[in-house]
Image (cartoon, rainbow, N blue to C red):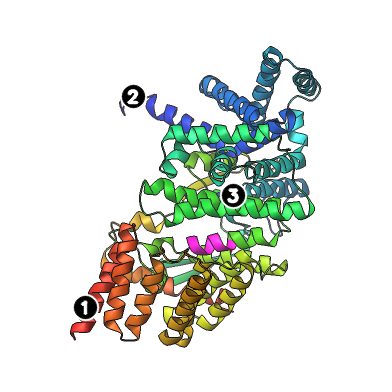
Amino acid sequence: MRFMAIIKANPETEKEGFHPDPQMLQDMGKFNEELMKAGVVLAMDGLHPSSKGARVKFSGNSRIVVDGPFTETKELIAGFWILKVKSLEEAIEWVKRAPSGGPDDYEIEIRQIGEMEDFASILTEEEIQYKKAKRAELPNQTFNN
Amino acid sequence: MSATDPHHVPHQALHRTIEAVWRIESARVIAGLTRLTHDVGLAEDLAQEALLAALETWPQSGVPDNPGAWLMTAAKRRAIDSLRRGSMLVQKHEEIARELEWQQERLGDALEHSLDQVIDDDVLRLIFTACHPVLAMEGRIALTLRLIGGLTTAEIARAFLVPEKTLGQRVSRAKKTLSEAHVPFETPSGDELRSRVESVLMVVYLIFNEGYTATSGDEWMRAALSEEALRLGRMLAQLLPGESEVHALVALMELQASRSTARRGKNGEAILLMDQDRSLWDHAQIQRGMTALEHAQRLGGGAKPYALQAAIAACHMRARIAEETDWDRIVLLYDALLQINPSPIVALNRAVAVGMAQGPASGLDALDALDAAATLAGDSALAGYHLFPSVRGDLLMKLGRLSEAREEIQRAIAMTKNLREQELLANRLKQLEKAASV
């Protein structure tokens, strides 16, 4: 099973020009190495503060672009890991080992990633066609050398 | 216990938590204990006892903040007790017990926190020990899954479709062999390292294939075997970052596994590479495989066996549609592979590639040359291999030599024992009959 462990933002990570505390960076690096050594991490990255981002709001046919930063800090994402493990409990056990983030509170949310197998029995032909079309747009060229 | 029982769910969740902790920590705990006791069997028994203690204690006390250190401490306490109490109270044991006790008193839990590097080396040593050539291959596989994969005997037995008792015997025999042969708990160096890495990689790849190619048995457990092999591979790549073939094997496994959804049809029937819906391939996984292959090539290992196999897989992945496959390059890669790793299976695959690159007549020539060479050498390896007539039938069919093709495919059907493959061949026979009647 694959899980996404999502680090929620806090006021600190949302600050302009945010750089993690060197100690925190070192602890996080050590933790990431542990995940790699256990062979359970498939991808991971940190995100810039929302001030460098944007939102696109949909309403009928209109698209309204709203520039960051966004206010509801706790709902924002500061980083993520994609973990391949045997159970939710294993994902939890790994996430519990992550370093604490200094004085500010933060939260890591764990969500299971959908697999193609989840849909095999319920997809209609139309939906399969749609999925195929979408998949065909994937950036194959990145390894098409 | 009913589903409405309030204790039902928490208890199960706790059980899964302990299982997760075990999976994360067991290799390190067993490896650390093996360093101290110089005996894999004893180390595993001690670790298991610590796990039992956890199962008894944690439901009341909760899971400790550092469960790995907790397990290690519990195991060491038991080690001291049992070594002292043991009937074989030889000086050696007395020494180990004293050392353990000393460590426990002086360093306590701090030991586990301060020795990260040692612990990594321990895990690597444990992998080399479990894959030691003194063991039969099945022993190596069982021991690796048990000591490093953290799988239970029951799980491994289920995956390999053998009775649990047989598997248990296999594991204990392997542990006994290691102890009797006085296999040192160490990471070999120099030439020895190279050949031992080969053995380790082979074990991991066999585990992967067991999960990947089997179509019978408990499907879920089989898939879990492939995933476990991939995890072991990624783990090894971290522990042996300079070994190109480790990265190459990871690449090969990632690339093969990326096709798993496309390999089976709605009714579980096998779908061959060329007929697969490529939109179902896992592109993130392909990307990881490509990165690992590039890494192996950067390390200068591009011409080694796993790297060549991964490069062949990569050729298929690069083709957006089957018709775009670069068969010329695949033939060259098979040529290189044959040079360093001559095997009838590789030669057969090469003949298929030749058939695709240069047309069925050339493919048939390559195949018949192979057959002639094997006959000349008295090599009967291909004689009982159903893919030989199956490939030959396919080439003959493309050449329009339909009655010969029919004979070959019938021969292949009689030779394979795999139901899915029989279905596949029977389908081809039907196509053939249709073509013949037109």
Q: Amino acid at mark 1?
A: Glu
Region in magenta: B251-258
In space, the residues marked 2 and 3 are separated at their CA atoms by 38 Å
Q: Is residue B380 visible?
A: yes
Marks 2/1 in contact by CB < 8 Å: the verdict is no
Q: Earlier in the sequence, mark 2 or mark 3?
A: 2
Q: Amino acid at mark 3?
A: Leu
Q: Is residue B425 left or right of residue A112?
A: left
In space, the residues marked 3 and 1 are separated at their CA atoms by 47 Å
Q: Find residue B16 and report its horizontal and vertical position in percent.
A: 47, 34
| Residue topped by disc 1 | B433
Work out whether residue B162 or residue B314 is closer to the camera in this orientation and state it: B162
In the rendered view, tell whether residue B373 sits above or below residue B181: below
Q: Find residue B201 and report its horizontal and vertical position in percent.
A: 61, 54
| Residue topped by disc 2 | B5
Q: Earlier in the sequence, mark 2 or mark 1?
A: 2
